[in-house]
């Protein structure tokens, strides 16, 4: 059934397409660049297709090459994952989780000790991304946490569950003096969430004379904003999810708890369909459910 598949050529093709250079693919496969080039030509001959645009020493994928790469990468990733699950206990008792950097540092990691206390035999590999919505076609990742609208629309290969909603409110250090000169801590970002979630919109909806004329102080990360507020630098308009641990620890307090800006998207735990049957993945998903209810 599979006797005619040029597996070595497909491995060389997948590595070259993924890494972008023949030399890098050769190093990964422990062969010479000439051997990789030979396999690439062999695959094109076998398929009677041009898979590469060649520009001197540079190569890029053709449309047919892009299509083949997607299938190859998926198949090799799935095969690697399947083999890993057949390995001894330590090999398959790990789970990879990718989530936005701010959510990882401000929400997940402060809680992760609880997971390891309950499940010391499971290794959670934390991968961070600056992307809050895109699910990358990387099948080595078991679980993604992403902020998506409801109803959630996913590729048929994925399943997911809603974790929690988000709104944005005003927080400050418990020792902050509202009657002194006030700084409004703001986010300077190209992220579209801050087109509608910002101090201008909050003050339009909830006018506060004491905040009129306050100075805006910009930061380029949620972590920086929240740490500045903890340090007493000013008031921060921040996600209830991202400040939840700081509020629980008494480092921040909500100043106007009923005056918040809602966000129309929700955090979801997303996984490739079928992965939830593996023990480490199922354990992490169940723990995330509990944390989402308790946050």
Image (cartoon, rainbow, N blue to C red):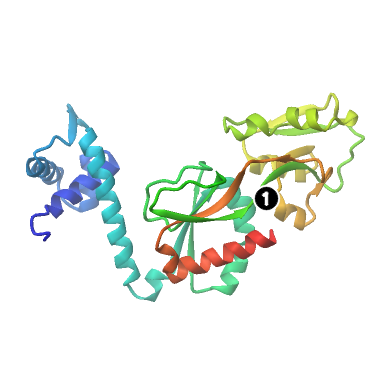
Quadrant housing the C terminus: bottom right
| Outermost residue to the top | 213
Q: Is 80 in front, or is 195? A: 195
Residue 228, visible in the rendered structure: no
| Outermost residue to the front | 151
Residue at image point 16% right, 50% down: 31
Question: Which quadrant of the structure image shows residue 199?
Answer: top right
Residue 28, visible in the rendered structure: yes
Residue at image point 26% right, 55% down: 76
Q: Is residue 147 above or below residue 86?
A: above
Q: Is residue 295 above or below residue 10?
A: below
Question: Which quadrant of the structure image shows residue 223?
Answer: top right
Residue receiving disc 1? 241
Q: Residue 251 in the image: x percent, y percent?
A: 78, 52
Residue at image point 48% right, 70% down: 122
Q: Residue 66 in the image: x percent, y percent?
A: 26, 38
Q: Residue 56 in the image: x percent, y percent?
A: 17, 26
Question: Which quadrant of the structure image shows residue 261?
Answer: top right
Q: Secondary structure at mark 1?
A: loop
């Amino acid at each position: 059934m599979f006797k005619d598949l040029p597996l070595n050529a497909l491995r060389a093709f997948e590595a070259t397409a993924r890494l972008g250079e023949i030399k890098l693919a050769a190093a990964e496969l422990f062969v010479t660049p000439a051997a990789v080039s030979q396999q690439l030509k062999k695959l094109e001959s076998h398929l009677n297709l041009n898979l590469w645009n060649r520009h001197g020493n540079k190569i890029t994928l053709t449309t047919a090459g892009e299509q083949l790469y997607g299938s190859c990468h998926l198949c090799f990733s799935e095969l690697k994952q399947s083999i890993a699950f057949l390995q001894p206990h330590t090999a398959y008792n790990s789970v990879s989780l990718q989530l936005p950097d701010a959510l990882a540092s401000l929400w997940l990691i402060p809680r992760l000790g609880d997971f390891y206390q309950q499940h010391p035999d499971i290794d959670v590999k934390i991968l961070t991304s600056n992307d809050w919505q895109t699910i990358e076609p990387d099948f080595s990742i078991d679980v993604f946490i992403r902020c998506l609208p409801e109803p959630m629309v996913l590729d048929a290969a994925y399943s997911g569950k809603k974790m929690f909603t988000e709104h944005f409110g005003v927080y400050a250090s418990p020792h902050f003096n509202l009657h002194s000169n006030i700084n409004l801590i703001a986010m300077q970002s190209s992220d579209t969430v801050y087109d509608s979630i910002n101090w201008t919109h909050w003050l339009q909806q909830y006018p506060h004379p004491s905040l009129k004329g306050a100075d805006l102080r910009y930061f380029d990360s949620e972590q920086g904003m929240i740490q500045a507020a903890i340090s007493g630098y000013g008031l921060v308009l921040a996600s209830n999810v991202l400040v939840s641990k700081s509020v629980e620890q008494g480092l921040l307090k909500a100043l106007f708890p009923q005056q918040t800006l809602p966000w129309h998207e929700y955090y979801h735990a997303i996984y490739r369909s079928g992965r939830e049957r593996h023990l480490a993945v199922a354990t992490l998903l169940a723990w995330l459910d509990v944390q989402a209810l308790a946050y």
